[in-house]
Amino acid sequence: MAGSTFIRKLQTRWGVQSVWQVLVILLVFALTGISAMYIKRPIFALLGIDANDPFWLRMLVWLITVLPAYQILLLLYGFLLGQFSFFWAFEKKMFSGIRKLFSR
């Protein structure tokens, strides 16, 4: 029953109506993460980035290419699985937090 408690806590934290909605949201996060992992490979190959390049360069390329793609995929999967409004609010909240980091 520990898993059920975790799901209920997420339901409360995210302010969603049902356990089913929590499971769909978790599915969206999973699909987005897997998709981002798969799109990273061809993007890095196209740009000639591999494991031999410095970490800072790989991270910079990831931030510029894969991170924005992740955000778009999150909204796309959210839309396809009927949770667009949740993920749109999630994105706005996340970018608001990032903006606050840089505006200090």
Image (tube, grey):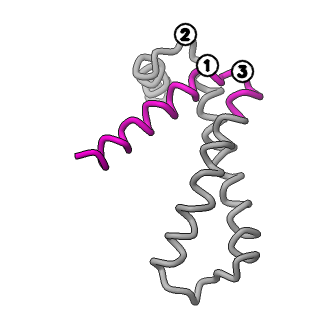
Residue that numbered label 1 is attached to:
21
Quarter assignment of residue 20: top right
Q: Main secondary structure of the magenta part?
A: helix
Q: Amino acid at mark 2?
A: Gln
Q: Amino acid at mark 3?
A: Gly
- Circles 3 and 1, Cβ within 8 Å, touching? The answer is no
Residue that numbered label 2 is attached to:
17
Could you tell me residue 93's position as x and y percent?
43, 31
Please give the name of the residue rendered at 64% of the width and 83% of the height, measured from the top-left corner.
Answer: 50
Quarter assignment of residue 28: top right
Name which of mark 2 and mark 3 comes first in the sequence: 2
- Circles 1 and 2, Cβ within 8 Å, touching? The answer is yes
Q: Secondary structure at mark 3?
A: loop
> Residue 88 colored magenta?
yes
Residue that numbered label 3 is attached to:
82
How far apart marks 1 and 2 lie (CA) works out to 7 Å
Task: From this view, report whether residue 51 is shown above or below residue 27.
Answer: below
Q: Amino acid at mark 1?
A: Gln
Please give the name of the residue rendered at 50% of the width and 70% of the height, measured from the top-left corner.
Answer: 59
For the magenta stretch, what is the residue range?
77-104
Using a 10 Å C-alpha cutoff, classify the residue at mark 1 as few (fewer than 14 neighbours), some (14 to 19) or many (20 or more).
Answer: some
The furthest residue to the left: 104
> Residue 83 colored magenta?
yes
Could you tell me residue 82's position as x and y percent?
71, 21
Please give the name of the residue rendered at 64% of the width and 81% of the height, measured from the top-left corner.
Answer: 49
